Amino acid sequence: MSAAGTTRVVVTGGAGFIGANLCRALTDAGVDEVIAFDDLSTGSKANLAGTGATLVEASILDPAALADALAGATSVVHLAARPSVPRSIADPVASHDANATGTVNVLEAARATGVGHVVVASSSSVYGANPTLPKSEDLCTMPVSPYAASKLATESYALAWQRSFGLGVLAFRFFNVFGPLQPAGHAYAAVVPAFVDAALAGRPLPVHGDGTQTRDFTFVGTVAAVLARAATGRIAHDGPVNLAFGSRVSLLELISRLEAILGHPVERDHQPTRAGDVRDSQADDSRLRSLFPDVDPVPLDDGLRATVEWFRTLPT
């Protein structure tokens, strides 16, 4: 148990891309003890270097390990998940097990250990086939992939635990988060690392479809800052909250901005549209702004520049 007055935040998925950036932000915010709870299936010990976090290597599908890790915590940020729409289409049951059942395990461990506050990561993919822009949290959710359905389960379980058991919950819908530590070089890589990795290696950029589809990109530093504030302030809300700022950029425009940063043009490799992909995405950020009125998002070009600089530090 933590001593009286000390803060102890557990980050499930803490060795992952967003999780490790959050661990560093929590340490910088003065949290006394930061625990990264991760089975390293997609995360990496190397991501935690210099974050000040302690790694607990275990799975959210192990209730006993969760209960041990959460004992004495002042807040939990639940990021552990099986990411990727294409991955969920290839193996939908595994996505359900990690994202839905795993979330119930985290919520039950929090309830059993008396944590009292949990932040969970949902996804903009829950809006799915709903064409309305921008996406407000009151819109009807229309998932078009097993991943999206499992993330809707994540937030629904969390909000149900809040109403049923009085657990303080904040359910964020992440949009397209990008930045340092986000992996490339695998079949399920997100679009920004896939583009940057290809551009720096001199390969054509893989564009699924015609490239006019739009996304609301959010730099990981901004996301980590909001998550850290939510955890340390134990901020809760009775509905889901978009964690993005209403920008809307097509993939072709993203490529143009990347070309400007790199100082040279890049080739495109147009590929078939992927099953489960959403055509357009843009957040209504009014609920987020009401909860975090002084948040100052990192501009897209600055975030892309930081991402390119990080990729350039990687061994080739």
Image (cartoon, rainbow, N blue to C red):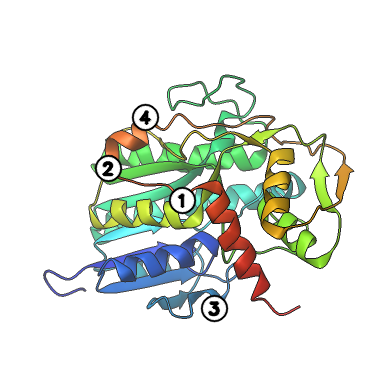
In the rendered structure, find residue 298 and report the number of the disc placed on it. Answer: 1
Name the element at disc 4: helix
Q: Is residue 68 visible?
A: no
- Which disc, if any, is residue 236? 2
Local packing at callout 3 (Cα closer than 10 Å; few below 14, some 14-19, many 20+) is some
Label 2 is placed on what type of residue? Ala
Q: Which residue is mark 3?
A: 45
Q: Residue type at mark 1: give it.
A: Val
In the displayed structure, 314 sits above or below 290; it is below
C-alpha gap between disc 1 and disc 3: 26 Å
- Dot 3 or dot 4: first in sequence order is 3
Badge number at residue 224:
none
Q: Which residue corresponds to the image point at 43% horizontal and 49% vertical from the top-left? A: 104
* Residue bearing mark 4: 286
Q: Is residue 104 above or below residue 4?
A: above
Residue 41, image quadrant: bottom right
The residue depicted at 50 percent of the width and 59 percent of the height is 18
Residue 128 in percent (x, y) is at 62, 29
Identify which residue is drawn at 33% across, 66% down.
26
Q: Give the Cα distance between marks 4 and 2.
A: 16 Å
Within 10 Å of the Cα at label 2, are there few (<14), some (14-19), or many (20+) other Cα atoms?
many
Report whether residue 288 is seen: yes
Whole-angstrom CA distance, mark 3 to mark 2, is 30 Å
Describe residue 102's horizontal placement relative to residue 83 as left or right: left
Helix, strand, or loop for circle 1? loop
Q: Nearer the viewer, mark 1 or mark 2?
A: 1
- Mark nearest the camera among 4 and 1 is 1
Residue placed most toward the observer, 61 or 205: 205
Mark earlier in primary sequence (1, 3): 3
Q: Crowding near pointer 1: few (<14 within 10 Å), some, many (20+)? A: some
